[in-house]
C-alpha cells in the first residue's frame, strides 16, 4: 500500500531523534508488509529525505534478506520532496527489476517506479508486465500509466492493453482503469486527456490496492 494512505502521526515528520538505522530496525520488527509500525517508521524516514536515509535504503536493496530489499524499495520510491535522489535511485531499482526473483520485492520495485514517474523505468516495467505471477503484473499495471509518457509510448501502451485483457481480474481491472483515466480505450488510439483525467491518474499513487 502507498505511504500516502498512512498520514504521519503528530511528531513523526522529523523522524524524532532516532537515526535512520534505528528507524530501519524498528520497521523490520513489523513483519507485515502493510503493518502500522513498519509504515510509521517508513513515513518518518521519508520525511527526513536526506542523503543518510538514501544511503541506508540503497544498502537495503543489496541485502540477502528479501524483507530488507522490499523495505529499501519502499523507501526509495518516495524519498524526499520532489524525489531529489531520483537519478541515483533508478539504477538501483532497475538492477533489482532485472535480477530479482522474490515476488514481493518485484511488486515493491514496480510501485516505486510508479511513484517516481520517470520514463527511464519504462523498459523494466514492460519486461515485468509479462511476468508469470499476477502480483508482479498487478504492480506493472499500476506503474505503466505513470512511466509511459504523454503521449504514451507505443510499447508501453501495448503492454498496458495486454494487462487490461489479463486473466487475473484485479490486474485487468487496474490496467483498464489506467487506460480509462488516460483517455484511452483498450484498442483505440491515444486521445487528448482532460485536466480532470490527468488529476485522477496522478491520484492513483495514493490508492494502490493490495494484490
Image (cartoon, rainbow, N blue to C red):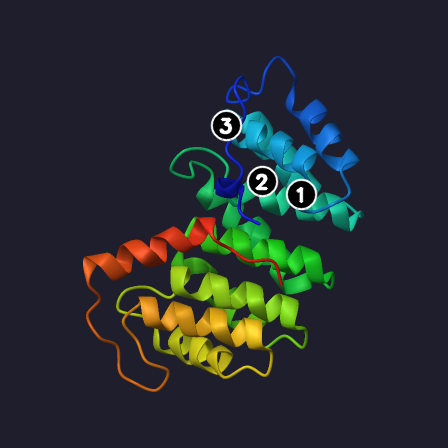
Which residue is most to the bottom? 187
The circle on residue 75 is: 2
Residue 131: % across, % down: 63, 74
Percent coordinates x, y for residue 44 in the rendering: 57, 27
N-terminal of the pair, mark 3 or mark 1, is 3
Residue indicated by mark 1: 71
User: Does the residue at mark 3 contact the one at mark 1 (Cβ under 8 Å)?
Assistant: no
- The Cα atoms of the two marked residues, 1 and 2, are separated by 6 Å
The answer to whether residue 201 is left or right of residue 53 is: left
Q: Residue at x 50, y 27 (%)?
A: 47
Residue situated furthest top in the rendering: 17
Callout 1 secondary element: helix
Helix, strand or loop at label 2? It is helix
- Dividing the picture into quadrants, the one containing residue 71 is top right
Mark 3 surroundings: few (<14), some (14-19) or many (≥20) residues within 10 A: some
Residue placed at 56% from the left, 71% from the top?
170
Of residues 19 and 206, the one nearer the viewer is 206
Instruction: Name the spot of residue 78 as percent of width and height, x first.
Output: 49, 41
Query: Measured along the vertical axis of the image, is residue 30 above or below residue 66?
Result: above
Q: Position of residue 33 (x, y in %)?
A: 69, 47
Residue 153 left/right relative to 205: left
- For disc 3, the marked residue is 47
Q: Are marks 1 and 2 in contact (CB under 8 Å)?
A: yes
Amino acid at each position: 500500500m502507498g505511504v500516502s494512505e498512512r498520514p504521519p502521526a503528530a511528531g513523526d515528520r522529523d523522524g524524532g531523534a532516532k537515526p535512520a538505522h534505528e528507524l530501519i530496525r524498528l520497521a523490520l520488527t513489523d513483519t507485515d508488509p502493510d503493518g502500522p509500525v513498519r509504515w510509521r517508521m517508513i513515513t518518518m524516514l521519508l520525511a527526513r529525505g536526506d542523503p543518510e536515509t538514501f544511503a541506508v535504503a540503497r544498502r537495503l536493496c543489496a541485502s540477502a534478506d528479501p524483507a530488507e530489499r522490499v523495505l529499501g524499495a519502499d523507501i526509495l520510491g518516495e524519498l524526499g520532496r520532489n524525489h531529489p535522489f531520483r537519478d541515483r535511485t533508478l539504477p538501483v531499482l532497475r538492477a533489482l527489476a532485472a535480477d530479482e526473483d522474490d515476488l514481493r520485492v518485484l511488486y515493491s520495485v514496480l510501485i516505486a517506479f510508479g511513484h517516481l514517474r520517470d520514463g527511464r523505468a519504462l523498459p523494466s516495467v514492460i519486461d515485468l508486465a509479462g511476468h508469470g505471477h499476477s502480483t508482479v503484473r498487478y504492480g506493472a499495471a499500476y506503474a505503466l500509466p505513470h512511466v509511459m509518457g504523454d503521449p504514451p509510448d507505443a510499447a508501453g501502451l501495448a503492454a498496458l492493453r495486454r494487462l487490461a485483457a489479463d486473466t487475473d481480474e484485479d490486474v485487468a481491472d487496474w490496467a483498464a482503469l489506467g487506460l480509462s483515466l488516460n483517455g484511452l480505450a483498450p484498442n483505440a488510439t491515444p486521445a487528448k486527456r482532460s485536466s480532470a483525467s490527468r488529476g485522477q491518474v496522478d491520484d492513483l499513487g495514493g490508492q494502490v490496492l493490495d494484490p
